[in-house]
Amino acid sequence: MQDRYQINALAKEESWRLFRIMGEFVEGFDVLSRVLPAVTVYGSARAKPGSWAYETASTLGAALAKTGYSVITGGGPGVMEAANQGAFEAGGQSVGLHIDIPLEQPSNRCTTLALKFHYFFVRKVMLVKYASAFVLFPGGFGTLDELFEISTLMHTQKLQPFPIILMGAQYWNGLLEWLRTDVVAHERLDAEALGLFTLVDSVEEALAVIQNFAAERDLIQR
């Protein structure tokens, strides 16, 4: 009898979890559909002010804002904070999508719009859905996870192609070389798939890629 009560309680809990998931999706869709066009910036939460990654992300955020793009990040410290800060100080739309987990540091305060998510998968959808380009700075598991998920979605045509810009050749070259000499060489991936990535070292290069793509797709008014 007790087992049956436990099963019923679990089923009820799962039902309420579905409503919470739906609520996060609805709020995200409603709010983020208003910030187009947008670019999502990923990178390490451990980048410190004064470092190349932090200062470059801040410059990029400002440049994107001045060009008419909203800047979307995961809302945390490091590269995310820097990109948000650059956009915020340039008077642009600065969006932070924070995740509620024990290990995550507090959300940064350099945003004009902030949303908090309980579920990683909902947050990941929101980081991708409304972006017309993705810029990835050096990072850890989270950044690499986002890189390969976006790549997989585009490679399998579940997401229309948008620029995937890898900022910092020194950091990304090793990964790209491994993909070429091991993954592609052993026919685990088509060589054409590596064309999804654009490797850059400067804000100017990244902005040129984004603007050229936008001009082709008419994503932003000039």
Image (cartoon, rainbow, N blue to C red):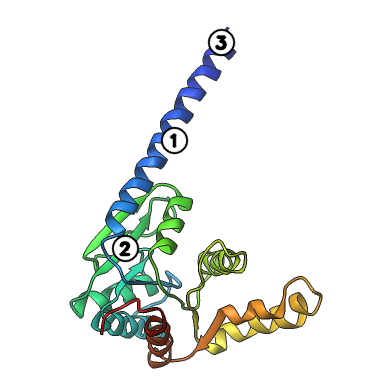
Can the viewer see residue 33 in this picture?
yes
User: Quick one: label 3, few (<14), some, or many (20+) residues within 10 Å?
Assistant: few
Instruction: Indicate the amino acid at tag 1.
Output: Leu
Q: Earlier in the sequence, mark 1 or mark 2?
A: 1
Q: Secondary structure at mark 3?
A: helix
Instruction: Indicate the amino acid at tag 2.
Output: Gly
Q: From the viewer's perspective, is 195 left or right of 70?
A: right
What residue is shown at x 48% (from left), y 30% (from top)?
14
Identify which residue, 186 or 155, lies in the foreground: 155
Q: Image quarter for residue 56?
A: bottom left
User: Does the residue at mark 2 contact the one at mark 3 (Cβ under 8 Å)?
Assistant: no
Q: Earlier in the sequence, mark 2 or mark 3?
A: 3
Instruction: Indicate the amino acid at tag 3.
Output: Gln
Q: Position of residue 186 (x, y in %)?
A: 81, 75
Q: Identify the residue position indicated by label 2 in the image.
A: 96
Q: Identify the residue position indicated by label 3 in the image.
A: 2
Q: Identify the residue position indicated by label 1 in the image.
A: 18
Q: Secondary structure at mark 2?
A: strand
User: Does the residue at mark 3 contact the one at mark 1 (Cβ under 8 Å)?
Assistant: no
User: Does the residue at mark 1 contact the one at mark 2 (Cβ under 8 Å)?
Assistant: no
In the rendering, which numbered label is found on residue 55?
Answer: none
Q: From the viewer's perspective, is 101 left or right of 156?
A: left
The residue furthest top is 1
For marks 3 and 1, give the CA distance: 25 Å
Q: Is residue 107 above or below residue 80?
A: above
Q: Secondary structure at mark 1?
A: helix
